[in-house]
Amino acid sequence: MGTQTALEGNEAVAEAMRQINPDVVAAYPITPSTEIVQNFAQFVADGAVDTNFVAVESEHSAMSACLAAAVAGGRVMNATSANGLALMWEILYIVPSLRQPVILSVVNRALSGNINIHCDHSDTMGARDSGWVQLYAEDVQEAYDNLIQAVAIGEREEVRLPVMNCLDGFLLSHSYELLQVEDDQAVREWIGPYQAINPMLDIDNPLTFGPLDLYDYYFEHKRSQMEAYPPAKEAIIAEGKRFGETFGREYGLFEGVMLDDAELVVIAMGSTCGTLRDVVHAARADGVKAGMLKLRAFRPFPAEELAEALSGASAIAVLDRAASFGAHAGPLYAEITAALYSYGQQIPVNNYIYGLGGREILPDDLATCFEDLAGIAESGQPSEPVSFLGLRE
Amino acid sequence: MSHYPPDATWHEMERGGIIPQAGNAVEYEVGGWRNEHPVRDDECCIDCLFCWVYCPDNAVHVKDESVKGLGFSAQHCKGCAICAQVCPKDCITMAPGGDFDENADRPEEA
């Protein structure tokens, strides 16, 4: 029934990859995701997996090789961070366009410049329109669990989309945490064998992939691609429930902590949610009706579900671990407020940008969010559109 | 994209934008892009077939492992000049204008 063990986030991801035993891994190393590929390459060298490991000369080539292997009919995985993800950009869009369920673990790191190797979400936030499903992990256990679920979500017949398994650089990738690693056989049974759809290596049924597609059909193709995302949302819920039934840890699109009767709600993604939990409980102990919403699925964005879950709040704070240069606020704030507006919720929302380039976020920083929210809940107006946590001002 | 009728709606698109048939590039005519056209000197040609191999649009006609005396497909040659570039004997030159001489295009020889 599995093993309790202490692993770094990168080791846990590599362990899940070993258990999944993909057909092809094509990768190029970059800090802080290097260990995933390094550890997995050792599994390949030791004969612990059957994977065809392809060492390529860049991330652009890595994602190109992954796409080709997926189109050929294989179950395919990869890992990267920040500038590596940026170098994959061209191919990132093509993978979901061709409806290939490639799995990419992204160890979140700040994009240059100046050059920085530490955590923020600027890399995957930039990729938010590329068509990949995005799951964000709070801790090492979730990074492990999300990767296994990513396989099942992406490979569902009605979904067939690539999935990014996002985990915070260093904070999770290089931190040892106790987690439950399930038995190899149980994981393999849970994900099941891979059934390729229209594999290119089926030479008796030749098809044309990625043809020139101009103003005559491209628009219709993009519209048909949009049909994959509502089922992807359903798949995240269904596979999260099935995972819970098998392994005892259930997942959804997001998780609420003390949310049901909360008046003051803070929304965040990733490892910061671990700190936020403690702050919420401390605020409750002080008599504040505080709550938190941890967003796990940023793509597809659960707009209607979030608007419903937040409908009882009187003031909301959205934490963005990325800047959106030239926009009026951070990317998560823009999505949350658009969702509230679209579904008729008139709730004041503050935006906090924090943690860029690995800047620490401390419980006291998060406590100030609840203090601000108490003020705007009374006035009904956000205090200022965007403010910063942990910045020297 | 001959698989799809011109008025096909997005509901009729195949998953992943595929065309569920192979070898359909022959139906995609790029000849209208051409603003200069290749001319081969058959006296100079050694039938190495480099032009046939390198042509990205299968526009070089070949028969019995020989291109001599055969032309180029006016429907598929887009005038890219790769054939002229790769010819080891410099037998192919690019002539101004998109129009081939009347006998240059012999699709029945393809």
Image (tube, coloured by chain):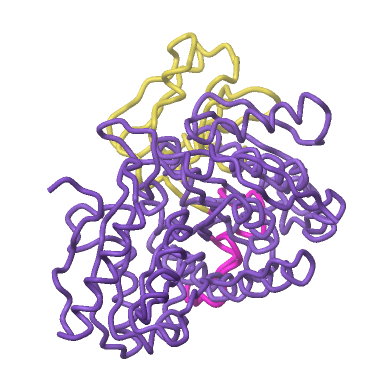
- Image quarter of residue A128: bottom left
* Image spot of residue A238 (x, y percent): 67, 74
Q: Magenta region: which residues?
A: B1-27
Q: Write down which chain is painted yellow.
A: B
Q: Residue at position x 17%, y 55% from top?
A: A326
Task: Tell me: A52 left or right of B30.
Answer: right
Q: Is residue B11 magenta?
A: yes
Task: Tell me: A256 left or right of A351.
Answer: right
Q: Is residue A373 magenta?
A: no
Identify the main secondary structure in magenta.
loop
From the image, which quarter does the N terminus of chain A lie in? bottom right
* Image spot of residue A270 (x, y percent): 46, 56
Task: Tell me: A82 left or right of A383.
Answer: right
Q: Residue at position x 15%, y 85% from top?
A: A379
In this view, B23 is above or below B39: below
* Image spot of residue A219 (x, y percent): 41, 67
Q: How many labels does the image show?
A: 0
- Image quarter of residue A344: bottom left
Residue placed most toward the observer, A64 or A104: A104
Q: Residue at position x 56%, y 49% from top?
A: B25
* Image spot of residue B24 (x, y percent): 60, 52
Residue placed most toward the observer, B22 or A203: A203
Q: What colour is chain A?
A: purple
